[in-house]
Amino acid sequence: DAGKTTTTERILFYTGKSHKMGEVHEGAATMDWMEQEQERGITITSAATTTFWAGRDGKKRRLNIIDTPGHVDFTIEVERSLRVLDGAIALLDANAGVEPQTETVWRQADKYKVPRMIFVNKMDKIGADFYRCVEMIEDRLGAQPLVLQLPVGAESDFKGVVDLIEMNARLWRDETLGAQWDDVEIPEDLRDRAEEWREKLIETVVELDDTVMEAYLEGNMPDNDTIRRLVRKGTCAVQFFPILA
């Protein structure tokens, strides 16, 4: 279980849609509305909800979310949803990585040419390995990953993420359950690795724009807004898959 419903519950909490984080294991998740789902702690049917989120420009955007089942017995429910989605977020357990059911659903998404992002969840779990997950995405899914964030720590030491576009670290304030954070300098032990992954990120996205590519080859780095624009362009065109931690 990669934690799809729990992640959806967090989104609803952070966006102000709900004022309590429903926990799947307590049978209190908003998205698991069926009695059988609440008893078993798994998602059986797809459930839809809507919330709003203000982007960097302050403009509120509507998010329509469909929370789909993860269990292999309910794969047809996922395919039904994929037919109508504008985009999908694939969740991976940071310990298990790409699982057989991940491959099945990924092939379905390929079939319908659905743009996707990948969220490596449960980085605080024992055995969590972000970089192994990235390798598995390439090897087992045959997909081109575009890493946008690196984890700061892992397992019980997981503290936040490094933003490879802004090139800063975002550390969670524990008492707010992730709703608030502090933007700080990238930890020294992650600086070289962050530079390396940012270079990979830029080299991938500049290929989508000849003008930007030419400028880059002449030694001119694209600004952050240009990087974001190209990340969006490539994602919508299903040319690569952004990865968040």
Image (tube, rainbow, N blue to C red):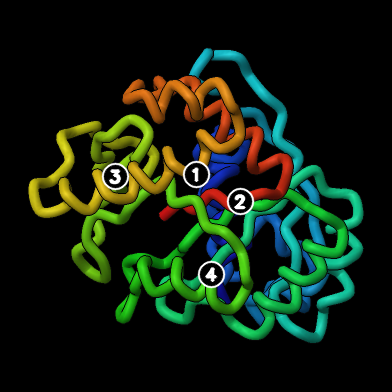
Which residue is label 4 attached to?
138
The location of residue 33, given as percent across then percent down, is: 76, 62
Looking at marks 4 and 1 on the same chain, the residue that comes earlier in the sequence is marked by 4
Which residue is label 3 attached to?
162
Residue 85 vertical position relative to residue 208 in the rendered view, above or below: below
Amino acid type of the residue tagged 2 in the rendering: Phe
**Residue at the spot x=44%, y=51% of the render?**
147
Residue 229 vertical position relative to residue 240 in the rendered view, above or below: above
> Is residue 173 in view?
no
For mark 4, give the secondary structure: helix
Which residue is label 1 attached to?
204
**Residue at the spot x=65%, y=43% of the render?**
235
The CA span between labels 2 and 3 is: 20 Å
Mark 2 and mark 1 residues within 8 Å of each other at the beta carbon: yes
Looking at marks 1 and 3 on the same chain, the residue that comes earlier in the sequence is marked by 3
Amino acid type of the residue tagged 3 in the rendering: Val
Q: Which mark is residue 240?
A: 2
Q: Nearer the viewer, mark 2 or mark 1?
A: 1
